[in-house]
Image: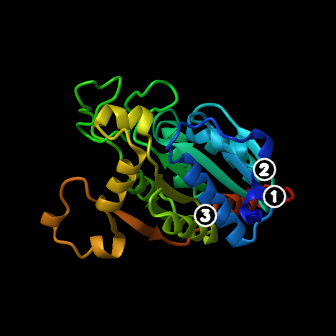
């Protein structure tokens, strides 16, 4: 069988992975390495950083220099790498709980400072690894082990949060829209500054079984039926933006001085040598 070119980016001795059958994390992980390959990045100039959670296990399967860090702390670890080695391409893999709950402050301040990182959030709407608790992105009314009658906490829109906090690239896609997801990640790599891509992924075990979507195919069909391309979404009247419909695509892209550039200026002003 012909070797698929992206397979060189995986640690074959770590496979098969331990994600549940039907999990969307593998789709998102493959999209990242395809975007890396398309961009022409190498294993020598790219670092993968992750926190804790189902999504964050991805770094262990990827054959790069990788860090599997503390819960919610992937962005500060990645910041240290980028400041010390600004020529490296630094990709952060995180989850909806890891990024927006315990890591929430790191997330918004990473956006605010416009640190030159590429953050990919695997959003499965729940804490999958630790028992299926509701996360800050669990939709209203959806069930979890900590919300057996449906969540009453209003969820974050991570893309709106990233843009409001100062990220210079913000996009969303899904595990169903594979080529679109690759495109969004690749475009985020083209941005200089804090780049954020939300990848909606299916979790049939923790989220699906609680919410009558235990079949992975059914969850992917839900993504297909409810995702609306951003250019179409913007033209829809408000009364059409109902139910579980949501936009995917590029939400925001701008240019602004990055934190590593600003930090070098501080060093120079202080009479030091910026490396």
| Residue 275 image position (x, y, % from top left) | 86, 59
Proximity of marks 2 and 1: CB atoms separated by less than 8 Å: yes
| Label 2 sits on residue | 63
- Residue 39 on image: x %, y %: 69, 71
Rate crowding at label 1 as few (under 14), some (14 to 19) or many (20 or more) other CA atoms within 10 Å: some
Residue 253 seen in this snapshot? yes
**Callout 3: SS:** loop
Q: What is the quadrant of residue 146 in the picture?
A: top left
Residue contact between numbered discs 3 and 2, judged by CB atoms under 8 Å: no
Q: Between residue 197 and residue 229, name the one nearer to us.
A: 229
Give the secondary structure at mark 1: loop
Instruction: Kindly tell me whether residue 157 is visible in this rendering.
Output: no
Q: Which residue is mark 3?
A: 193
For disc 2, the neighbor class at 10 Å (few under 14, some 14 to 19, many from 20) is some
Q: Residue at x 37, y 31 (%)?
A: 134
Residue in front for this viewpoint, 221 or 190:
221
Q: Position of residue 236 (x, y in %)?
A: 21, 72
Secondary element type, mark 2: loop
Q: Is residue 236 left or right of residue 69?
A: left
Q: Nearer the viewer, mark 3 or mark 2?
A: 2
Query: Distance from label 3 to label 2 (Cα)?
Result: 25 Å
Q: Mark 2 or 1 closer to N-term?
A: 1
* Rendering quarter of residue 57: top right
* Count of all numbered marks drawn on residues in the image: 3
Please state, as top left, top right, bottom left or bottom right, where the N terminus lies in the image: bottom right
> Is 64 above or below relative to 101?
below
How much space separates mark 3 and mark 1, taking CA atoms?
21 Å
Residue 200 screen position, x and y as percent = 44, 52
Mark 1 highlights which residue? 43
* 14 relative to 123 in the view: left or right: right
Task: Tell me what residue is drawn at x 47 percent, y 63 percent.
Answer: 170
Q: Residue furthest front?
A: 1
């Amino acid at each position: 069988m012909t070797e698929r070119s992206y397979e060189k980016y995986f640690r074959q001795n770590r496979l098969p992975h331990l994600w549940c059958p039907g999990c969307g994390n593998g789709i998102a992980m493959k999209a990242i390495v395809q975007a890396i390959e398309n961009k022409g990045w190498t294993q020598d100039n790219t670092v993968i950083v992750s926190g804790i959670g189902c999504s964050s296990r991805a770094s262990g399967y990827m054959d790069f220099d990788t860090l599997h860090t503390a819960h919610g702390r992937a962005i500060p670890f990645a910041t240290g790498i980028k400041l010390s080695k600004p020529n490296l391409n630094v990709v952060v893999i995180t989850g909806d709980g890891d990024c927006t709950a315990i890591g929430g402050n790191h997330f918004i301040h990473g956006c605010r400072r416009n640190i030159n990182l590429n953050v990919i959030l695997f959003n499965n709407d729940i804490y999958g690894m630790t028992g299926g608790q509701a996360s800050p992105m669990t939709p209203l009314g959806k069930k979890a082990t900590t919300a057996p009658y449906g969540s009453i906490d209003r969820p974050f829109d991570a893309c709106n949060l990233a843009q409001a906090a100062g990220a210079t690239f913000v996009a969303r896609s899904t595990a169903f829209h594979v080529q679109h997801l690759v495109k969004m990640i690749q475009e985020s790599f083209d941005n200089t500054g804090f780049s954020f891509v939300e990848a909606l992924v299916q979790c049939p075990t923790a989220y699906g079984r609680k919410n009558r979507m235990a079949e992975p195919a059914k969850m992917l069909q839900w993504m297909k039926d409810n995702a609306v391309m951003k250019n179409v979404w913007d033209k829809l009247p408000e009364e059409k933006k109902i139910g579980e419909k949501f936009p995917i695509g590029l939400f925001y892209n701008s240019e602004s001085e990055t934190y590593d550039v600003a930090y070098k200026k501080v060093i120079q002003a202080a009479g030091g040598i910026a490396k």
